[in-house]
Amino acid sequence: MSQEQNKDMSQYFYRASAADFMKIPGSPVAYWLSKDALNALDATIPLSTISNPRKGMCTRDNDYFVRLWHEVSLDRIGFECDSRESAKLSQKKWFPYQKGGDFRNWYGNHINVVNWENDGYELLNMESLGWSGNSTNHNLEYIFKPAIIWSKITSSIPSFRVSPQGYLYDDAAGLCAVKNEKDINNIIGFLVSKVGRFYMSVINPTLNIQPGNMASMPFMQLESKSWSKGCADISQKDWDDFEISWDYSTLPLIRNSDEHHLPKIYINLLTQWRKSILEMKCLEEENNHFFIEAYSLQNELTPDVPLKEITLTCNPHYRYGGNRSEEELETLLQCDTLRELVSYAIGCMMGRYSLDKPGLILASQGETLQDYLCQIPSPRFAPDDDAILPLTDQEWFADDATNRFRDFVRVVWGDEHLQENLDFVAESLCLHAIKPKRGEAALDTIRRYLSTQFFKDHLRTYKKRPIYWLFSSGKHKAFECLVYLHRYNESTLARMRTEYVIPLTAKMATYVQKLEADKDASTSAAEVKRLEKEIAQLHKQQAELSEFDEKLRHYADQRISLDLDDGVKVNYGKFGDLLAEVKAVTGESPEVLS
């Protein structure tokens, strides 16, 4: 090769010192690291010096040992235990369980519980109790203690969160137990920062973060700063503002009691959310700036944080992602916020929530209206007597979900703006949830949403483990109703039949007779054609309702009981094809389960 060729090829080669590689924890061949990035390592210690990164637990049978928290009885969950001893003394069965989850920083993804009854007796003795193997990585010295956790598998960017006391840890969420709790804020600030992300990509360029990677992270012991605490506080408030959180207290739209015009209330809430997003963005950028300066990486990194990485549920850029326009993002957020209003209202109808008391009211197996009234003797908006809410496509029952939703809006915001408020709900639902219909009244739009889309949204919110179960007669929707899982009892199906299905059979027969008389009396060909179409549809619904009634009677006679410890997947399969979306929930078709 000529001297000229050698000169040309030299631009493709890096010169790196073997001593420099030794500075990098684990000595990866990161030949591209700058001098600044290497020199910063001289002032660092491995994160393992002040913490204990560990794998989370592998139960070997998550179907048996792990649940979503809302599936089981609230009174069976032990929250905020600070030790194995206190957990055992609580006599609870289920305990909060960190299980990784979506990309989210600082706080959140608290949706799972694990069976640790009697100090984890079953988990710790699996083989002797008949399992083919034992669970592993129990981390007994760390469980129930505060830690920093991460989702082991990442899509591209790692995320880290503070786990308060009271949790156990799953294999999908590694834990970093910090030896001195005062270091937690600085450690998570470093890990979430662009500097932490930069060095993680050096140590582990894959998408699977292992404890060894965490142990090797080059940590610089610096004066504690408050940005991490502020970020975690904002993130926690955001997480608890949505009903998937067990610390959800009330719907954000309802907090402003001084305003009664729902469109204005929504604008005010949007303003608050934007303020939180910008505050979080500012804090994260200050955090980045701090660590970039400390590690002298100004030539490598900038402190800027794109909006899509501000991991707050109220942030549409993060929540919906993709290359959507600002208008589309705002549309999705408005629609979902009003869907959440409908969901909260259904929760109040069921007695899960109340306008008069924050937090969960009835959320344990077998609780009744009397249990509710013991807590709230004179509710402004009373829950349903039997937690059976009809979702019919027309008004067959005065107390159906649609009429009760109108009453809910009236109780919350009064009569003066009732129609405007209902109009705003309907318009918002038509932005994305359902297609608008020209000339349709607001209450009819809300009825259509409840009948066609609500349960699909509920399934998505509750990760295919619904708490409001949709009993359905079939594709013609002759009869559908929601039943609240935690208020179900052995007589629920019998009551559904006697209070709703049998009366509806008579109402339909009477209505068909009326339509037949109207058709005979009509002189308009168009009107006759319309009536004939409606009558034909009603005949189909009558046949469907009759078949449903027979099946309902069969299951009602069995007086089926549930054990919420078994989880929704098992319990949902006990009712054959009386329920909608059986395969989506159980993974099996109704025929297989029957």
Image (cartoon, grey):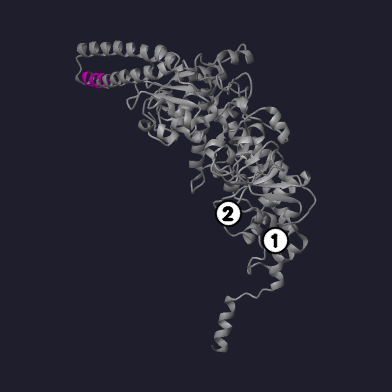
Label 2: few (<14), some or many (≥20) within 10 Å?
some
Q: Which element is circle 2 on?
A: loop
Can residue 244 be seen from the camera position used here? Answer: yes
Q: Please provide percent x and percent y for residue 291.
A: 72, 55
User: Along the horizontal axis of the image, is 95 left or right of 592?
Assistant: right
Q: Report if residue 554 lies within the magenta region.
A: no
Residue stretch in magenta: 528-535
Name the mark on residue 410: none
Vertical placement of residue 142 versus 546, above or below: below
- Looking at the image, which is closer to me, 239 or 563? 563
Vertical placement of residue 547 versus 272, above or below: above
Name the mark on residue 208: 2
Point 60% across, 20% down: residue: 355
Q: Please provide percent x and percent y for residue 370.
A: 58, 12
Q: Tell me the residue that label 1 is attached to.
A: 298
Residue furthest right as drawn: 223
User: Along the horizontal axis of the image, is 83 left or right of 567?
Assistant: right
